[in-house]
Image (cartoon, grey):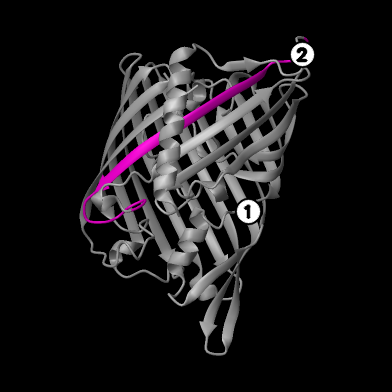
Amino acid sequence: MFTPSHLKMRKTRHRNKGLFGSALLLAAIAAISIGQSRAADWQLFGPNAPDIEFHGFASQGFLDSTGYNYLGASKNGSLAYTELGLNASFNPFPRTRIALQGIAYDVGDAGKYDPILDYAMAEYTFNDYIGIRGGRIQRPQGIYNDIQDLDLGRTFVLLPQAVYDARWRDFYESLDGADLFGTIPLGACGSLTYEIYGGVIRPSMDGGVALEIRNELPPSAHLDELNTPKVIGGQFWWNAPLDGLRLGAAGVYIPSFTFTNSFETPFGPIRSVTKSSVVGQQYSAEYLWKAWTFQSEGCFLANTSRLAPSTNEYDLGWYASAAYRFNKWLETGAYYDEYYIQGAGKATLTSHSDTFQKDAAVAVRFDVTNRWIFKVEGHYIHGTALLEDNALNPERRDNGWWMIALKSTISF
């Protein structure tokens, strides 16, 4: 069964141009996947040097919804859901690993196929109790945050958006810094796995956080700059003595997140600076039993403004999911999630529907080959708190709506 707990190694605006490029890459990776039975191992520095292992993936999705445009212009059917990646890794010395990955993605108006250095890190493991990695690293938080691009590792097309917003990868998934990690045995009580990190985040002007800020600014305002905020945090997993059960807790603190915007006036532009601090918590539970996978997570995020406390925002989200693997080519799953906005932080709230979003999803996954999967997923959604695109959704009502999601992923 392909779940994160079974993985031995961590993962490893011109729309037409972007779709054409993704189609070419899908075709190329398909040819590579069919023509070879394992990942490419190259010896670039001579026969005695360690192999450099290359992997890659390409995903193309399709979203079609009723009522509202979600994650792009989905009311008319949208192909603006694409992920591309290429990574390499090698072990130059014992207990040492060097790895890097570049990705590009497009989810509605977020991403826009801009190349992103997802990670580029060096890792050294002293022993089972402690190791260190540094560079551009992936931020551990919950079950999926640092493996969001590993489509083979989950049943669903869309992760529960109440916890894992597909548009915010540039802000939440990686940081430039370092972390300590290891596993501490607890005897009859199981073991404790930990990761503690610190560094800086480099959000993209085409990423999810920039998209949300633009959505909340007045029409006459322009987003000029996002700062590079510092971040510290950690995650702990208790691996219970009951085989397959683990419980996790994660926390993150961003002491100063700043963005600058400007307003055009007859007397010239007026610049405005908004400063806030962010505190987040996430709690996770996962249980693997025979062919079943059960997961549940809840998160809390407080965005506190230093200049206008009346605009403080509190976001709450949770989900519960179950998946069952019938055989090597068929898996099904379902989840239910809820997301709430509290406080006055969302200046664009136009109805009660904008304060919450509830989503019930059912998915079927087909493993066509070991390297090619296809997924079909249906959603019934009530609420509009995560729509975020006011231009595509000028009116919101307190009603339910439907969405279908398709996705095909090829990897090598």
Secondary structure under badge 2? loop
The residue that mark 2 highlights is 46
What is the three-letter code of the residue carrying label 1? Tyr
Q: From this view, report whether residue 10 is shown above or below residue 251.
A: above
Q: Which residue is nearer to you in this view: 315 or 28?
A: 28
Mark 2 in CB contact with mark 1 (< 8 angstroms): no
The residue that mark 1 highlights is 253
Residue in the picture at 44% in, 37% down:
22
Span shown in magenta: 48-72
Q: CA distance from mark 2 to mark 1?
A: 45 Å
Q: Which residue is nearer to you in this view: 184 or 99?
A: 99
* Picture coordinates of residue 52, whole percent (x, y): 67, 20
Is 169 situated left or right of 368 in this image? right
**Label 1 Cα neighbours within 10 Å, binned few <14 / some 14-19 / many ≥20:** some
Q: From this view, report whether residue 159 is shown above or below residue 357.
A: above
Whether residue 90 is visible to the viewer of this picture, yes or no, is: yes
